């Protein structure tokens, strides 16, 4: 007769199998960009990037400004015109005539990011863009022809949106939290690559017609997240989401503390908790079962408890550890000794993930940067809370509470 323990082991095996398929899909050789000019080069593209100050902001924005496309307008959006990011945006815009600065104002009914994206579109209505392209400011494309190849799949009428993800490059001397962040983002990347049912908010594009037909402005205008809401709309419309693996972006990860990583991890699952509940509970069951295998194997070996299930538990444990080693091998510029440490850290990744899942049940607030958003039962924003009275100057940012500085 099957016990709850046997069911938990079966779930761990299922999770492990999914991750192996995801990693194998991710490890397929990257297709090189075609040399010929894609058909999408004839379409007008509006690239919108919401901006907030960080040390690599100018470098990243400069890369976006240097992208090549015959019909391109780049819009950098800040919440106010007196924050540190605004000064950097103005400098980049002064060097590139096709770049523009838009001031969105403070968000009251949605997240600040959603507000920035919507105001960027509204301010450039006279451009009559054919395609809207949205990117985050904490990563950057490495190829100047990136845009044309990224949006090219949109010529297929069955595809409603395109997306990609980021290659994370660890800091020079990575600490525990940096390893945890690398594991978590690699898991996200593998999942997106395999399922192709979600867009990643850091880089996605759709035709303006698709945006309008799915009432994206209305949906973004009352919620705290852009990518999950967009994914729902595209899938419900009967169209597909295409993952463009050859257009991965580059992210130089800043050093993180465990507190910052935990805050970031919790927020990722809060978006699922409020906007994709089935995904949240599936993740909870899978990851909690996985964590149990790390706890139960030593217990079984030392006490003989549930000895009949020792082999399945051992298989689960070894499979997850090998999976961790495979993920570690993907890290760019990491020393062999660091890869070993990274592999050994996988139980901490699972434990941190489960803690993040539990934290979601304890609050209705999503904290991001300098704001907190109270989420109503229907997913709308019930309240926007400013965590600081005003946006600090760049030289004061490091003195703030580190919990407000977690990765976006």
Image (cartoon, rainbow, N blue to C red):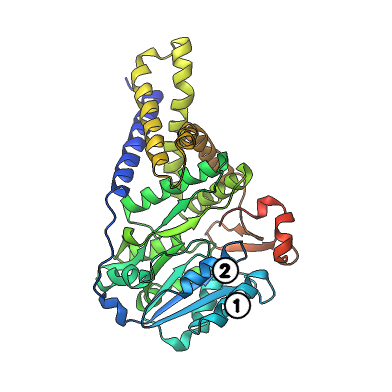
Considering every residue shown, the one lying at the far bottom of the view is 126
**x%, y% of residue 368?**
61, 58
**Residue at 34% in and 65% down:** 162
**x%, y% of residue 357?**
53, 42
For the residues bearing labels 2 and 1, Cβ distance under 8 angstroms: yes
**x%, y% of residue 355?**
56, 39
Q: Residues within 10 Å of mark 1 (few under 14, many from 20)?
A: few
Element carrying mark 1: helix
**Residue at 38% in and 59% down:** 248
Q: CA distance from mark 2 to mark 1?
A: 9 Å
Q: Which residue is mark 2?
A: 58
**Which of the two residues, 277 or 347, is positioned nearer the viewer here?**
347
Q: Mark 2 or 1 closer to N-term?
A: 2
**Which of the two residues, 403 or 119, is positioned nearer the viewer here?**
403
Q: Residues within 10 Å of mark 2 (few under 14, many from 20)?
A: some
Any part of residue 1 in sight: yes
Element carrying mark 2: helix
Q: Is residue 213 above or below residue 257?
A: below
Q: What is the count of numbered marks?
A: 2
**x%, y% of residue 266?**
56, 47
**Residue 406 horizontal side relative to residue 335, left or right:** right
**Residue 142 horizontal side relative to residue 384, left or right:** left
Q: Quadrant of residue 249?
A: bottom left
**Residue at 46% in and 21% down:** 296
Any part of residue 387 in sight: no
Q: Quarter holding the N terminus? A: top left
**Residue at 34% in and 56% down:** 197
Q: Quadrant of residue 370?
A: bottom right
**Residue 123 horizontal side relative to residue 402, left or right:** left
The tag on residue 91 is 1
């Amino acid at each position: 007769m099957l016990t709850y323990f046997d069911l938990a082991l079966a779930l761990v095996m299922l999770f492990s199998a999914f991750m192996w398929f995801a990693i194998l899909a991710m490890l397929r050789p990257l297709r090189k960009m075609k040399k010929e000019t894609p058909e999408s080069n004839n379409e007008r593209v509006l690239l919108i990037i919401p901006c907030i100050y960080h040390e690599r902001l100018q470098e990243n924005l400069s890369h976006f400004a240097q992208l090549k496309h015959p019909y391109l307008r780049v819009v950098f959006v800040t919440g106010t015109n007196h924050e540190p990011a605004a000064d950097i945006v103005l400098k980049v815009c002064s060097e590139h005539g096709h770049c523009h600065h838009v001031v969105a104002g403070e968000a009251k009914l949605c997240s600040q990011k959603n507000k920035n994206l919507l105001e960027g579109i509204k301010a450039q209505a006279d451009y009559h863009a054919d395609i809207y392209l949205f990117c985050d400011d904490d990563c950057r494309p490495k190829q100047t022809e990136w845009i044309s190849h990224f949006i090219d799949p949109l010529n297929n009428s069955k595809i409603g949106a395109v997306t990609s993800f980021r290659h994370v490059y660890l800091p020079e001397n990575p600490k525990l939290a940096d390893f945890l962040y690398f594991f978590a983002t690699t898991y996200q990347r593998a999942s997106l690559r395999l399922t192709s049912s979600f867009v990643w908010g850091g880089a996605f594009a759709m035709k303006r017609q698709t945006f309008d037909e799915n009432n994206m402005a209305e949906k973004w205008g009352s919620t705290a997240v852009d990518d999950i809401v967009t994914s729902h709309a595209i899938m419900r419309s009967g169209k597909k989401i295409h993952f463009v693996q050859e257009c991965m972006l580059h992210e130089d990860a800043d050093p993180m503390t465990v507190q910052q990583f935990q805050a970031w991890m919790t927020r990722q699952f809060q978006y699922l908790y409020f906007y994709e509940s089935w995904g949240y509970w599936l993740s909870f069951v899978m990851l909690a079962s996985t964590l149990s295998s790390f706890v139960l194997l030593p217990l079984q070996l030392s006490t003989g408890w549930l000895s009949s299930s020792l082999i399945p538990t051992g298989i689960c444990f070894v499979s997850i550890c090998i999976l961790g080693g495979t993920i570690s091998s993907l890290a760019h510029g990491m020393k062999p000794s660091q890869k070993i440490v990274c592999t050994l850290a996988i139980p901490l990744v699972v434990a941190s993930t489960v803690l993040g899942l539990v934290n979601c049940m304890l609050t209705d607030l999503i904290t991001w940067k300098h704001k907190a958003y109270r989420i109503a039962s229907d997913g709308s924003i019930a309240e926007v809370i400013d965590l600081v009275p005003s946006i600090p100057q760049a030289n004061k940012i490091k003195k703030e509470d580190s919990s407000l500085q977690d990765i976006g």
